[in-house]
Amino acid sequence: MAVTPDSAVFWYGCNMTRHGEVIRTTTRLLEAVGMDAAPSGGPAHCCGSPKDASARINEGMAKRTIEGFNATGRETLVTWCPSCHMNMQDSMAPVTPTNFETVHVSEVLHARRDKLRPLLKGRVERRVLLHAHLGFNGRVPVNAMIPEILLMIPGLEVVEHPYRAPGHMCSAISAVPGALADAQRATLAAMAETGADTLCTIFHSCHRESVSLERQGVGVANWIHLLAESLGWPAEDGYKAWRNAADPRAAIGEAGIAAVGELAYERFLDAELRKKPTI
Amino acid sequence: MTLVEHIRGESARLASLCTACGACVSACPMTPYAAGVAEAGPGAVATGMRDVLRDGPGTPAALAWIAACTRSGVCSAACPEQLDAAFMMRLATWRAKGALGEAPKIPVKEDTQYSPKVKAFARLTLTEEEQAQWL
Ligand code: SF4
């Protein structure tokens, strides 16, 4: 008898649209461990936190998001973003009733890792330092679970270092002058001390802020990229290539610019892609 | 219940349990980035944070600490009363930003390009079919 996959919504959040390959690969990973997770995100599925200065607007956005998820009838909400996850538990669900359980994607993949193990056939010869933060780990122990998943990859080593960046992800510390630069310097020092060749990011905003560290001679990959590499699944990190290109417009190419729209590219993407590295 | 009621209710509940001992301030890795916190001392900063939860004006050092909060969460583990100090700081941040309708007490940085940027990146990294189904 065929086993019916659990039905879930994969709430990837808002800013993950920079990393379409991560959304796609994570959805495929969830499917591989028996979870049919429908990806859902972007501004129409916002947690409301971009409007933290108005509880009324914040609540309206959060309510619309929960009502949309409730309407799917799917019993599990799989989160990606630690901020969305905490907001769902702390301020969204207590205000608007939910008919689903909220779990983080790392919890699902960790609990079902025995299903992933036989699929991880390709060797990934890397010595990896996990880009770990202090925050969120108290809620979901990502800093222990993700290395346990990664260690199933043949050839991959995970080094241990006690450094933990403050905050729950890099977007938070990037808003405090000096904090991101300090964290990046400490991270590079930890990599040098442990002989790590690759920094493995957990969250999207950490990945976004860390990709330019490749200019300092280290590799930067998200944990989903590393899993994809071993699985032999295509998951090219376009964002990293654009951020590190001398000319991001040329790196994106004409077809990509046409898809975004010339005006939208100039107004919304060009400045971010040309942003100088923090350190 | 509305979010305003939730913020008010949780602020009052947690403020009534907080002794303003300052253990959360002492444990916080962000205090070096918050002007005046070292000089004011942990107890005074915690008192100022609790004041914000009680509709008060807070103090400059407490507001600087609230503005520098990045949700590291070590404050909750440090609290001898076993309060969710990290959530108290989230509540204090809302209140200091003027979420309940008052004038903001700390800078509010809103990315006005947030939504069009998210959609523009989606057009670059997702297929049209994925955009139609996933956004
Ligand atoms: S450690 Fe707990 S009791 Fe002490 S000031 Fe902080 S929140 Fe209040």
Image: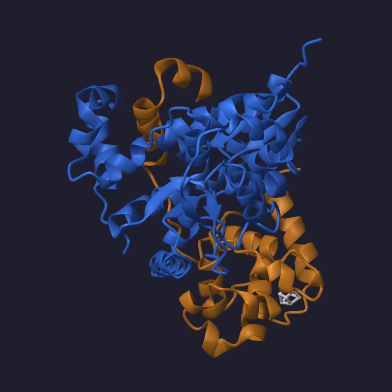
Chain colours: A blue, B orange
- Ligand 1 falls in which quarter? bottom right
**Against B14, is A15 above or below?**
above
* For residue A135, side relative to residue A96 (left or right): left
Q: Quadrant of the C terminus of chain A?
A: bottom left
B134 w.r.t. B64: above or below: above
In the image shown, does B1 or A23 lie closer to the viewer?
Answer: A23
**From this viewpoint, is residue A14 visible?**
no
Q: Position of residue A191 (x, y in %)?
A: 44, 64
Left or right, B29 with respect to A15, comes to: right
Please name the residue shown 69% across and 64% down the image: B88
Q: In the image shown, does A52 or B104 lie closer to the viewer?
A: A52
Q: Is residue A261 left or right of residue B29?
A: left
Q: Residue at x 51, y 68 (%)?
A: B68
In the image, is residue A88 above or below residue A200?
Answer: above
Whole-percent x and y of residue A49? 55, 47
In which quadrant will I find the N terminus of chain A? top right
Residue A73 position by quadrant: top right
Residue at point 34%, 28% (across, down): B124
